[in-house]
Amino acid sequence: MIYTLKNDKLTVRLTDVGAELLSVLGQDGCEYLWQGDERYWASRAPWMFPVCGRLPGGKYTHNGKEFELPNHGFARHSLFSLTSKSEDALTLTLIANEQTKTQYPFDFSFSVTYTLKDNKIGVKLAVKNTGDCVLPFAFGAHPGFCAPLEGIGSFADSYLEFAEAHTPNKILFTENLLINGKRAAYPMRDDRFIDLTRDFFAEDATFLADTCGKLTLRSHKSDRFVTVEYPEFPYVGIWTRTLNGADYVCIEPWTGLPDLDGAPHEICDRTDLSHLQPGERKDASLCFTFG
């Protein structure tokens, strides 16, 4: 089912499949969200759960058993239920079921709440452990935004601006797109800016830790912008395809990382994941501002 939130600044459409945003349309008809194209990337703004990124061979172990879990988990392909709705907000929830337990043998509820106010979309992600054992998980966002914004200029006219000058740390990956456990200081132009070129994505995504938690997509050819605020997320990824025509960039706040390279690991031993005791809940909020 498709749901709509609307005010005098934005019209927002989303679906119960993956609780995914489908469109963020300004009142003047400007579309901010990538509209999907199978030649480059068919998704628009999926949510990651119960893992972010890849596992070794797409597998992990738990209590001596091996499980298969797809890249970024299963939430993005799952059907969520509408659990609350008002004029300016709604909540969609995924609850553990027989299908999820074939991949992830834990009891949980995972909710995504959208709130529209002026030119902002607030999002709260919430996971509750509804089982009787520790719940290991990560969640994250994967929205793709049009680049160039407003369709003016080219992809290379786009750039990213952090709200503060600083030097984050880059997460280092192996050739299998799994982490190697190392990080390196990542200097930026004037300590704040990242210029978007196709070459920037030659090694796939760039993931950063220790950022200031606020990042804006801008263009040299337009005054349009998209700001992503993610103070409760320790990592942010930047990704697109290198192919010409892939006119989008993903800004991806995550609470966890891909697994270490090697053989499948016991999921409860992963220190980068959250671990909830029975009955506990973890929330984290994001805010998208469109101008």
Image (cartoon, rainbow, N blue to C red):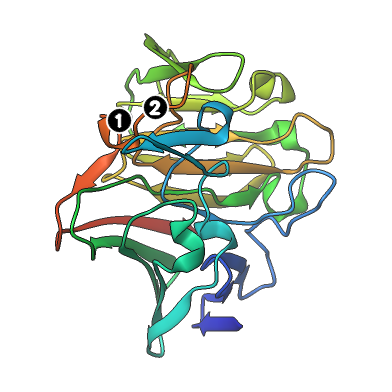
Identity, as a three-letter code, of the amino acid under mark 2: His
In this rendered view, identify the residue nearer to me: 256 or 270. Answer: 270
Q: Label 2 belongs to which residue? A: 265
| Residue at x 47%, y 27% (from the top left corner) | 207
**Is 137 on the left-hand or right-hand side of 37?**
left
Examine the image and state in which quarter residue 163 appears: top left
Amino acid type, callout 1: Arg
Of helix, strand and loop, which one carries label 2?
loop
User: For mark 1, what is the residue?
Assistant: 270
**Distance CA(mark 1)–CA(mark 2):** 8 Å
Which part of the image, by quadrant, shows the N terminus? bottom right
| Residue 232 visible here | yes
**Residue 115 appears at what percent x and percent y?**
38, 74
* Label 1: element kind: loop
Q: Residue at x 35, y 26 (%)?
A: 209
Residue 190 seen in the current view: no
Residue 284 position (above or below residue 212): below
Rendering coords of residue 92 (x, y %): 43, 75
Asked if the residue at tag 2 contacts the one at tag 1, i.e. Cβ–Cβ closer than 8 Å, the answer is yes
Q: Dot 2, how many residues are within 10 Å of its Cα: few (below 14), some (14-19), or many (20+)?
A: some
- Pinpoint residue 109: horizontal percent, then vertical percent: 33, 67
Marking on residue 285 = none
Where does the image place residue 244, in percent across and percent down from the top left?
84, 34
Look at the picture and state if 239 lies above or below 176: below
